[in-house]
Amino acid sequence: MNSTESSTPPLAPPSRASNPFATCWTCPGAIPFQFPRGESAEQLVSRLAEQNWWGEIVGPHGAGKSTLLESLKPLIVAAGQRVLAISLHDRQRRLPSELLRQVRAQSQMLVIVDGYEQLSRFRRLTLRWRCRSTQVGLLITSHSRTGLPLLTQLNPDRAVVDSLVATLTAERPSRITPADIDASHAVHGSNVRELLFDLHDRHESARRSNRQATATVTNTATAPIRLSAADKCLRC
């Protein structure tokens, strides 16, 4: 082992305390939804109420649909609605029977289904019929229009990305540069979820590079100077 390797402390593993793009900071509910100019959570809840508590949030993968739902839920509850929510994952084609049993005739209930398009067409029609027949509200997220009244359509642009990055790095600084954001946005576009994953990796790469560069400079400054026999004679 050479002197550089022996004197360089091991690099600490990625830490959520040091990486502002760790999933604990970027998951739905952990970061506020970045509303486009002229739109707010209050406006969307008001619009949903005007639509008799029926609506759909439409947007591509990673556009922030789940994050928006988490931002709307407290205001929906404050408006007097009882929320019955479920998130569908991994091609979940049907709703739990327990949830369907809870959808019964009563006022001020809102069923929220995140990932509605994963249900089979029959299950979607069944849910809609059940909610209409019991006068229960229905709010869903989907990648494309499904026929429910449109609440909002998401298509995050670079301004939204910049706002997110500024929010995330306000308390946990990062070496991520505008060039990094440009490169990531060019690849992932409106898929903010994948973009933030990419910035997480870029942050870690920059952290490692900085650590290695610092260690190299330190080792160069503190390494003993080895003199040749001729040099030693000249200094005598």
Image (spheres, grey):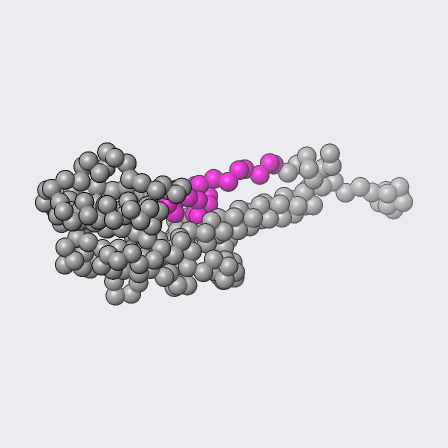
Q: Which of 43 and 25 is in front in this view?
A: 43
Q: Position of residue 57 (x, y in %)?
A: 28, 55
Task: Answer left or right for 114 relative to 168.
Answer: left
Residue farthest along the bottom direction in this orientation: 38
Which residues fall within the magenta stretch?
9-31
Locate the C terminus and report the quarter of the image it occupies: top right
Task: Assess whether residue 13 is covered by the magenta stretch.
Answer: yes
Q: Position of residue 175 (x, y in %)?
A: 50, 53
Task: Tell me what residue is drawn at x 80 percent, y 41 percent.
Answer: 226
Q: Position of residue 137 (x, y in %)?
A: 17, 49
Task: Tell me what residue is drawn at x 33 percent, y 46 percent.
Answer: 120
Task: Answer left or right for 123 relative to 223.
Answer: left
Task: Answer left or right for 152 relative to 132.
Answer: right
Name the quadrant containing residue 55: bottom left
Residue 194 in the image: above or below residue 228: below
Name the quadrant containing residue 17: top left
Look at the image and tell me whether residue 139 can be seen: yes
Task: Tell me what residue is drawn at x 86 percent, y 43 percent.
Answer: 228
Residue farthest along the front direction in this orientation: 122
Q: Nearer the viewer, residue 221 or 139?
A: 139
Q: Provide the major secondary structure of the magenta segment.
A: loop
Q: Which of 172 and 195 is in front in this view?
A: 195
Task: Assess whether residue 179 is covered by the magenta stretch.
Answer: no
Task: Answer left or right for 230 relative to 147.
Answer: right
Task: Tell me what residue is drawn at x 19 percent, y 54 percent.
Answer: 54
